[in-house]
Amino acid sequence: MWSRQNLLFTLCIASSQVISAAGLIRVSGYEGREAKVSCPYEEGYESYEKYLCRNECGDDDVLITTTRGKTDRYSIDDDKNKRVFTATISDLSSTDAGKYWCGVTRTGKDIYTEVKLDVKPDRCCDHFAKVQGYENSSVSINCSYKSEDGNNLKYICRGNQPSTCLQQAVVTSDIKQNGQFSINDDKISSKFTVTITSLTQKDSGMYLCGVHRNTGLDVFSGVELEVKEWCCMKSHTVSGIVGLPVTMECPYSPQHRTNIKFLCRGDHRNDCTVMVTSQHSSDQTDHRFTLQDDAASSSFLVTITELKAGDAGTYWCGSDPQWSVGNYTKIQLSVDAALPFHPVVFIVPTVLLALTFTLVVLYKYRCCKEQGINKNRTTKTAEADDGMSEDNDYENQEVIVSSKQGTSKQQSTWHRGDEDAGEDQQDSVYQNFTTDDIYCNEVYVKANKR
């Protein structure tokens, strides 16, 4: 028989020594979520007390027991049919990570199973692969996995929260089609592909490719999808004037050199009317549109002759009948009214030119007139002087006749001196004339002759 003191001593030793009766149990969970620790036990212990404890499992380390029920963040449930009790830890934090023990109370030494809890942040991932798609088209997302996960469940979900990804999966490898989402698992290349059709802007965002594992946390890889508005190789504007021609240039891929080129008109590419093609067709109704292909420059030109105001609008030119993204040019054509005829624009410069010419002529005429008047005055003065000279000559001649022969020499000398003075005066007059004076004098002379 054991004494009471010996029994208490034995229980204290049992509570401080942990003996593992089974292998290590690994449990993982995400911050803010919960972790379930499932602990199996042997037959015959169904009615025994079970508990979960931490560290060395002292009295202060016991977190929950089947006899005390739920406490704080911990709860426990014993499935006696399966001989498994499950302890749940809710609202996990990083401090919850570490060593735990599943315990079964019995006389003597308790039965313990070691538990290792790993707590990770509820987010993924450090790297997101970039994938681009276009509205109304489809996109494929490739997700790789390890070869040992070949038979495991694959899935994809929106967002970057691993803890709820499987529950919110948009498609799984068990259900291969779900609306616009489909999945194909290629186990040989260890890759599964998710295809999304009929893309819209709302499909943009983060996705997680998930591989389910029976033990531990699922494995994820991140993808960021960007859905762009469907557009073209180039987009530009062209302007023209009513009644005049306009030319639009459309580049294309060199691989499309032998493809049929075309120009269509419409606000949307899915609903546009073909105006002209590189293959002459009897269906063309508006022959103002002509297309000229220049294979050397990988482009073609479309010319519209005699533009009309109604030709303004959106045009699409391309070389790919499948409307693949990036193989088209979007052209916005604007048509301005013909420039009106303004007589003032032509009359005013002509009048100004004529007025300028008239002012120049009047100025020249006035200049010449003033110089003519001055010339007349000079002439009259000269004539008066000549008259006085003649009178003096006659008087001198009478004196000379009655004078001596020596006096005639003085007269001859006087005449020579007078002639020399006249020549010097004439040279002085010509030297004072400018080019304008000569021109004006010519005009004056001509006017006098008339």
Image (cartoon, rainbow, N blue to C red):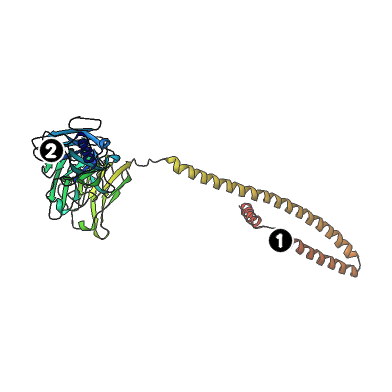
According to the image, label 2 marks what residue?
A: 84
Q: Nearer the viewer, residue 424 or 203?
A: 203
The quadrant where residue 171 appears: top left
Q: Nearer the viewer, mark 1 or mark 2?
A: 2
For the residue labelled by badge 2, is the local secondary structure a helix, a strand or a loop?
strand
Relative vertical location of residue 229 with respect to residue 414 in this rendering, above or below: above
The total of numbered circles placed on residues is: 2
Above or below, comparing residue 93 to residue 401 in the picture: above
Mark 1 vs 2, N-terminal side: 2
Alpha carbons under labels 1 and 2: distance apart: 138 Å
Q: Give the position of the N terminus as an image quadrant.
A: top left
| Badge 1 density bin: few <14, some 14–19, many ≥20, Cα 10 Å | few
| Residue 8 lies in quadrant | top left
**Of 340 and 423, which appears nearest the observer?**
340
Q: Which residue corresponds to the image point at 68% horizontal and 51% vertical from the top-left? A: 371
Residue 160 x %, y %: 25, 41
Residue denoted by label 1: 431
Q: Residue at x 62, y 52 (%)?
A: 447
Q: Is residue 290 visible?
A: yes
Pinpoint residue 28: horizontal percent, then vertical percent.
22, 43
Amino acid type, label 1? Gln
- Measuring from the top left, give residue 265's x and y in whole percent: 23, 43
Closest to the observer: 318 or 441? 318
Residue 271: in sight, yes or no? Answer: no
The residue under the point 65% across, 49% down is 367
Disc 2 residue type? Val
Q: Position of residue 421 (x, y in %)?
A: 79, 63
